[in-house]
Amino acid sequence: MNHNDRNRATRERLIAVIERLGERAIAMDGGWTTSALLAHLAFWDRLAETRLAKFVRDGETPVTAEPALTDLTNGAGMRQWTDTPPAVAAAQARDAAEDMDRLVEALSAEKLSALMTLDRPLLYDRSGHRTQHLDQIEQALRRTR
């Protein structure tokens, strides 16, 4: 299974999870809710899409952030993500995943090869991040049965 297949599979799983959630925001550990995680996924897919689009357009190596900055970004975004209504978070997560995947699928072989040499697969393979949080959301759904 290649990165496009993995992205597609996790996007389809995301859509199925959103349908199961409906308009609920289920509380989770650490102050998170299911809708906050969806808003978080939307943010990070949008950031990856923005970085990738700039790379495609300008040919510049995509900027990266140290793990500490990523943690700070998550901390700073938490309030906004928890305040995002479930339907809005769901639509944003779905739309961001669709837009990101469409951009990745349209990459030329040359651009994809250049990306792969950077050894930063999160720039084009979003499946790992999505899977991590979809697992958490599904666990929360199981607890509410």
Image: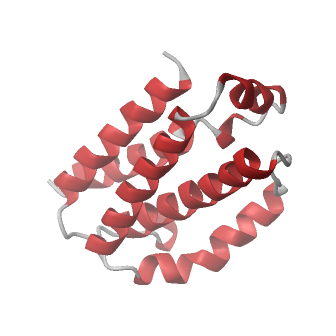
Q: Residue at x 73, y 61 (%)?
A: 70
Residue at coordinates 82% horizontally, 57% vertically from top-left? 65
Rendered location of residue 124, percent (x, y): 62, 37
Q: Residue furthest top?
A: 1
Q: Is residue 134 above or below residue 104?
A: below
- Is residue 124 toward the left or the right of residue 5 in the image? right
Instruction: Return the residue nearer the eye: 110 or 101.
Output: 110
Image position of 93 (left or right of 113):
left
In the displayed structure, 141 sits above or below 126; it is below
Tell me how many marks there are: 0
Q: Which residue shows up at 43% across the image and 69% down it?
A: 36
Which residue is found at the position 69% from the left and 34% from the top?
121
Residue 120, horizontal then vertical, whole percent: 76, 36
Which residue is at the front of the view, 30 or 11?
Answer: 11
Q: Residue 80: x, y in percent?
A: 51, 82
62 over 7 or under it: above or below:
below
User: In the rendered view, would you say 5 is above or below 122?
Assistant: above
